[in-house]
Amino acid sequence: MQKSKFLRIIKQSTLVFLSLLFTFLSPLATFAIDDATLDFNAENNITFYDKSDGICEGMGSFSIGDGELPAETTRYLDNSGVREKAANNLDRYEYAASQTGLPWQAIAALHYREAGLRSKGSILNGQEIKDTPYTNVDGRTIYPDINEDAKSAAETLVKMAKNVYEVELSTSSDIEAFGKAFLSYNRGYMYKNSKPETPYTDSPYVMNGLDENHQKMTWKHADSYYGDKKLNGLEGSIDPRPGALAVMKYLGSNPDSGCSGSISEGGLTEEQAKIFMMRYGENKNNDSAKVSKGLWAMCNGGGSNCVTFSAFFIRKFSSLKNLSDLPGHGKDIVKNLVNNYSLPKSSTPSVWSVFSTNSDPIYGHTGIVLGIHDGKYIIGHASCSNKGIGKGNGELSGGGSGFVIVESTPNPSKWNYGRGSDYSFAPLPNVDTSLIEDYINNGP
């Protein structure tokens, strides 16, 4: 697969919404966000992002621990370019993940801690990858092939977790298992054999930056030796870098959740929605185009608008599998669903509901509410005006067929860009969340 640029979370919000521009299931041309709309969004802090050109491909996307990472941790990782550097190395992570059954984010976290995500830095222990194999200071082989190096590191993580803590590591492992695994990888038996035994939660390599109680942690049992030779003097020093668990969380990884995470009653999380939009824009096996039928190619010769996406979501994930080509634009979709399929109409957004708005007098706008969490919304759009085709990079300017708006307040005047007042919702019947999970994890 192509390398992912990952998602830059541009606004701190977590209600997930998918919204699409203008028209629905009509043979007429349909339209997307124009320049005036985009200017309005920027002026009113309406945030967009569109998933980039790499998708987790079933490797697992997880959320470690409760809540969000501390702002200090996120800022540190943002400023260090961790997402971009991880994207550049994604192929090797995914290869190692496919060989070991681990989430690729765990391997990326090792790479960060061991080699600072350097492309020529061995994930195994941070030493330089050379043109020929050689034995490192730990007696392990550093392979010239970066995929084999990643695989070796992943296998070592699994082996050390088993040997030191009797942890059978997999994508279903919990935070404690990953914490012990990372500790065993970094310090082997040193923490376990200390008196009293020191837990993984005391290790900066593992825990630093994961929450407010673990910031700028001090090293314990940290000095390493090769025979009688002391290799470092870390004992008592402060480690400023985020630990492996924080990096996993930052890259969207959670041992409880598979690629997208399990779907809660509140619908998709922000990260799940991003991956969902990326899958849609990818149009793998022509799935998005086939399900949405004749509308896909109208935008830029192979993209999507709001109607295209609404048609896709309704047909693929609700019980309205045989939804006909109802005439109408985005502003007409809820009315047509209510009149022709007896769906209830509401003025209140709910998870898995379609909305319509008269954002302009002719075409309007439609979309899907993908999730509601803590009163916050994430709205995804598709737009011909955006001139995007494919996966994009999580931003409006990222070149994808779809993008997401993050909005912290349920404010319909922003959802329809301040150009309409009539806003209505129609909850979709029997939305199959297990099918959505599989779509996010593995694609169509």
Image: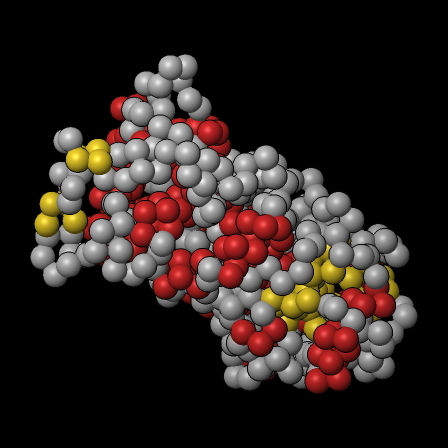
Q: Which of 319 and 215 is in front in this view?
A: 215
Q: Residue at x 61, y 46 (%)?
A: 70
Q: How many marks?
A: 0
Residue drawn at (78%, 67%) of the image: 415
Q: Is residue 99 above or below residue 75?
A: above
Residue that protrudes farthest toward the top in the picture: 196
Q: If the image is split into quadrants, where does the N terminus sit? A: bottom left
Q: Judge whether 108 appears above or below 156 on screen.
A: below
Quadrant hosting residue 357: bottom right
83, above or below 228, in the image: below
Most foreground residue, 10 or 33: 10
Q: Horizontally, is 249 left or right of 223 in the view?
A: right
The spot of residue 347 in percent (x, y) is 88, 56
- The type of colouring in the image is secondary structure
Residue for point 37% across, 46% down: 113
Tell whether 68 sits left or right of 329.
left
Which quarter of the picture shows residue 188? top left
Q: Is 7 above or below relative to 247?
A: below
Q: Can I make out residue 221 in this image?
A: yes
Query: Image quadrant of residue 132?
Result: bottom left
Left or right, 333 with reference to 31:
right
- Residue 128 spot, x, y in % from top left: 21, 56
Is residue 402 at least partly visible in the picture? no
Q: Where is residue 8 in the image (x, y as percent from the top left)?
A: 55, 62
Q: Where is residue 225 in the image (x, y as percent from the top left)?
A: 21, 33
The answer to whether 66 appears left or right of 17 in the picture is left
Residue sitting at 15 percent across and 59 percent down? 130
